[in-house]
Amino acid sequence: MNRATRATATALALLGALSLTACTGGGLPDKGAAKAPATADPASRSDLRPFYGQRLAWTDCATDGYECARLTVPLDYARPGNGRTFVLPVARAAATGPGKRIGSLVFNPGGPGAAGAGSLEEGMDEAFGAAARARFDIVGFDPRGVGGSVPALTCEPAEEEQETGTEEKEPTEEDGVPEGVAPLYPRTEADRSAAAAGARTAAEDCEKHSGPILRHVGTDDAARDLDILRAALGERKLTYLGWSYGTSLGTSYAEQFPRRVRAMVLDGAIDPSLDWRQRVLSQSAGFRRSVDDYAERCAEIAGDRCPGRTPGEIRALVERLYQRAEREPLPVAEDSSYAEYGGMDATAVLDAVSMAMYTPEDQWEPLSEALREADRGDATKLGALGDEEETESEDTDTDTTEGEEQEDASPDASEPPAVPADNGDAALTAVNCLDVPHPRSVRPYWDALAPADKAAGVYGTAGVTAELTCRDWPSGERRPHKVAAEGVEPVLVVGTTGDPSTPYAEAVSLAKQFPAGMLLTYEGLGHTAYGRGDACVTAKVDAYLVELERVAPGATC
């Protein structure tokens, strides 16, 4: 992946992860604006009966204490009988109080692109309160195209293609020739051409390596998979908790299957009524506020490790690093993942700083030390904040059936593409771009730069630039809309006042859009609330999940 392409992917991972995802709706839906609830149970369709008739065959997972299974869903709900499917990993942690078990509690950890089954095996059940764990089997699944899904998304060229340069594409007259990485605020025609060309390359890579499934990984289809999972679990109604992107998935489910919801918690809410530009402004302003919070309150959490004595000094240091990284990448050690790119460019620095806003209690101390060292000339620790191991999926065991499914939907059935074990970035891009309509011309993106700069500085302009990949993406049919879920039980929306990625205002809006929607406010910093240790939040959410106890208007923790 060249540096321009890498910058585009990094920016999408940072600023597109949650702001772009839109809710979806409708049984075999008219995917226009707001939708009326489906009148017929999809399970009654004869061509869907084989899917709804499944019962999960549980076996021990590789990780002790968990059980695993596989769920088969149609690749294309318009043609479910054509033989093409996704096979999705499912995992569960059994209720700790089996004598009082209520049923299954399905969760989505966010993304889009986070693997629920893998997250559960890594201990995600511990994020739930003791009362919820006692009464429910905690169930996670990998959404279509994500993680261990077969087939799975990938946007990466094979190693041999990278080595021989066969992935290089002739630039178009509109895009120009990319030279280096576009700055956080591309002002010149040359910078904008470089950003557009890099985004087009990223989109073309995804089309080449995952083309047959790109149009089938949207949130509307994932929510329909969720209903098949409900049936396969033997549940008459769904009990669900979604974090971040999981709120979009849950909202979509509530719109399509309003009378199938027993209880639903949406934590870190995404407002489905916002268009792509409104979403960028909302989320990027959230990140900017969070970095300001870091400067103001660093001493409370990081103490003497803060990289400045005053909030002004900390803000100045962060800004100084952005400016330096735009002129020349910040130096890193030879074993850093950024060494092959010559160091950390401005996008990478923005990524590291912003991602550290998610959990201040865990990340502000290491961020502070990393910023101090980067300012002294060594950005190795700053680059390591977001490092993740990437291993190829061929290193993991798969059975014959899975291999056959992968070949069926691959661009070249004789040679299915190698999919990284963590394909979260590809899934993030694919779902975001498919779910939310984007302009095909570059002009609306450039027109959005100045307002984004005014609202959120470099966080806003980098967010706008990150959207460019979506202009060359396969078109979805979703449109921004208010929630239409007539007949759904009261849904609990949880909003954190200092949330960087899903700003509190979106939680307020989403709660108002649901019939009898409830809002629980957590006055705190960081992304989402439930599972981060606040006893008040845990008690109220668990009481709702277990006893269906409603949260009073104005409830605050």
Image (cartoon, rainbow, N blue to C red):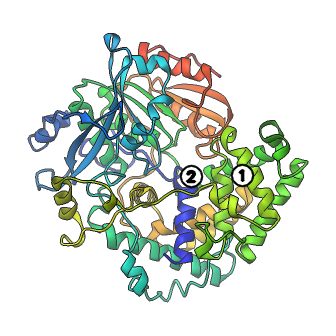
Q: Quadrant of the C terminus?
A: top right
Q: Is residue 482 visible?
A: no
Mark 2 or 1: the one toward you? 1
Q: Tell me the distance, in whole angstroms, between the alpha carbons under discs 2 and 1.
A: 14 Å
Residue 346: quadrant of the picture? bottom right
From this viewpoint, which residue is outermost toward the top?
A: 99
Q: Position of residue 195 (x, y in %)?
A: 57, 76
Residue farthest along the left direction in this orientation: 46
Total numbered circles: 2
- 509 on left or right of 58: right
Determine the residue positioned at 58% across, 43% down.
502
Residue at the location (39% across, 41% down)? 116
Query: Which residue, given by chain and number where applicable, does mark 2 sit on?
Result: 279
**Vertically, is 392 above or below 231?**
below
Q: What is the secondary structure assignment of the residue under circle 2?
A: helix
Sooner in the amino-acid sequence: mark 2 or mark 1: 2
Query: Label 2 amino acid?
Result: Arg
Q: Quadrant of residue 349?
A: bottom right
What is the crowding at mark 2: few (fewer than 14 residues within 10 Å), some, or many (at least 20)? many
505 or 300: nearer the viewer? 300
Q: Is residue 64 above or below residue 481?
A: above
Q: Nearer the viewer, residue 512 or 239?
A: 239
Residue corresponding to mark 1? 288
| Above or below: residue 81 compared with residue 7 | above
**Of residues 184 and 331, which is closer to you in this image?**
331
Indicate the position of residue 262 as horizontal and vertical percent values: 35, 22
Name the kind of residue labelled 1 in the image: Arg
Q: Secondary structure at mark 1?
A: helix
Left or right of 33 in this view: 234: left
**Residue 156, x across and y down, in percent:** 40, 70
